[in-house]
Image: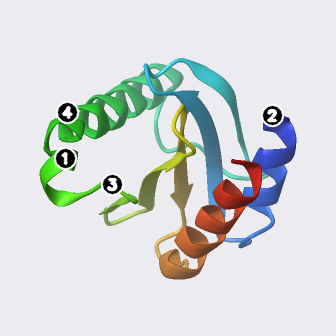
Amino acid sequence: MNHQKLYRDIMDLDPKIRMVTICGENGSIIFSDHRPGVVNLLSEEESKKSLEMAVRAWNSRKSIFPKIGKGKYVLAEYEKLKRITMPIGDIYLVYVTTEIEADHSKIIEGISKLGKSIQ
């Protein structure tokens, strides 16, 4: 998989996307970058911690997937941004932050379509 192309394809979904991180299920960062001009709200260490927490939460939910079905995405909305965590295939997670006014439904649908095209 061309991770840089996937990053660009996700960024092209909406100009309100701030950052995209593609990681393995274990949380290892495969590719990560932010939109030019975006000011990071967290330090590099805080960003890594936030990603670790999101991946850990995603993986902890897997134990209930057999009963409720496979997870599609998790949306967290804060005062200053939104964060979307969702799988791409069976081995990748994408972690996307957006401006608060972003149309997260459109972004989630777009990422889902991208994921289906690379499986």
* Percent position of residue 3, x then y: 79, 35
Q: Residues within 10 Å of mark 1 (few under 14, many from 20)?
A: few
What amino acid is at disc 3? Gly
Task: Classify 73 as above or below 102.
Answer: above
Question: Mark 3 vs mark 2: which is more N-terminal?
Answer: 2
| Residue identifier under label 3 | 71
SS for tag 2?
A: loop
Question: Mark 4 vs mark 3: which is more N-terminal?
Answer: 4
Task: Classify 61 as above or below 75.
Answer: above
Residue 87 left/right relative to 68 = right
Residue 72 left/right relative to 57 = right
What amino acid is at disc 2? Met
- Which disc, if any, is residue 32? none
| Residue identifier under label 4 | 60
* Percent position of residue 110, x then y: 65, 71
SS for tag 3?
A: loop
Q: CA distance from mark 1 to mark 4?
A: 13 Å
| Residue identifier under label 2 | 1
| Residue identifier under label 1 | 66
Q: CA distance from mark 3 to mark 2?
A: 22 Å
* Percent position of residue 47, x then y: 46, 31
Q: CA distance from mark 4 to mark 3?
A: 11 Å
Q: Residues within 10 Å of mark 3 (few under 14, many from 20)?
A: few
Q: CA distance from mark 1 to mark 3?
A: 10 Å
Q: Residues within 10 Å of mark 4 (few under 14, many from 20)?
A: few
Task: Give the image quarter of residue 62.
Answer: top left
Quarter of the image with the N terminus in it:
top right
- Of badges 2 and 1, nearer the viewer stands 1
Q: CA distance from mark 2 to mark 4?
A: 26 Å
Question: Mark 1 vs mark 4: which is more N-terminal?
Answer: 4
What amino acid is at disc 4? Ser
Q: Are marks 1 and 3 in contact (CB under 8 Å)?
A: no
